[in-house]
Image: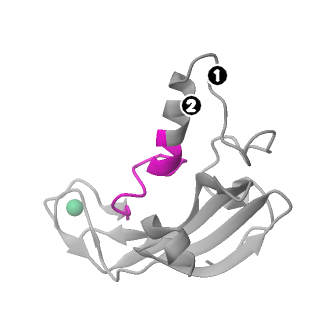
Amino acid sequence: MLLELFPSLFALVIEEVERRPEQVVLRTRVRAVTAECRCGWSSARVHGRYVRELRDVAVGGLGVVIEILIRRFRCENTACPAVTFAEQITGLTTPHSRQTPLLRGVLKTDRAGPGRPGRSPPGLRGRHHCGQGRTVATCQGPARAGS
Ligand SMILES: [Zn+2]
């Protein structure tokens, strides 16, 4: 059901849905066991994990936040300059992005609209923004220690 609402999350397992007063938070992890480094080598050696937060388009007037438990892998290619790398989810994440491609598209269209510079989609207006913190722990709510 959830994947029917959020088809762009097919690569993720949605583990929990939290309804907050003005937003819905989807807690997810990546389905795949391995990830591919920039050098093209695949790795299953997990070096660490952190929670990454992406904002998505609003649903039913509620802002949508996707929390992804991102794994950092150790690259086993001795010729690779990247000792470790964070997994990226094709079609969903790019390095340092804080929004889904879908939301970026909506915001770009919105900005380009006549007389409506930079408006946020419904459900995201007037919302607490987390700044540029990298994990949810730096942003809001209790830290999820040990994850
Ligand atoms: Zn590599």
For numbered disc 1, what is the local secondary structure?
loop
Tell me if 81 is positioned left or right of 126 in this view: left
Residues rendered magenta in the picture: 86-105
Number of numbered labels in the structure image: 2
Task: Classify 10 Å Cα crowding around label 2: few (below 14), some (14-19), many (20 and above).
Answer: some
If the picture is divided into quarters, which one holds ligand 1? bottom left
Residue 103 located within the stretch drawn in magenta:
yes
Query: Quick check: can you spot residue 145?
Result: no
The amino acid at mark 2 is Asp
Q: How far across and down, in percent of the image, does residue 104 sit?
A: 49, 41
Give me the disc on residue 12. none
Residue nearest the observer in this picture, 52 or 31:
31
Check mark 2 vs ligand 1: CB closer than 8 Å? yes or no.
Answer: no
Residues at marks 1 and 2 touching, judged by CB atoms closer than 8 Å: yes
Against 24, residue 101 (above or below) is: above
Viewer-proximal residue among 110 and 24: 110
| Vertical order, 16 against 76 (above or below) | below
In the rendered view, would you say 75 is above or below 98? below
Residue behind label 1 places its C-beta within 8 angstroms of ligand 1: no
Extreme-top residue of the structure: 115
Q: Which residue is found at the position 56% from the left and 82% from the top?
A: 1
Instruction: Give percent across and percent down for residue 132.
Output: 63, 42
Q: Main secondary structure of the magenta part?
A: loop
**Which residue in the protein does label 2 denote?**
110
Residue where numbered disc 1 is placed = 116
Between 95 and 121, the one nearer to me in the picture: 121
Residue 140 percent coordinates (x, y): 78, 57
What residue is drawn where x is 59% and y is 63%? 66
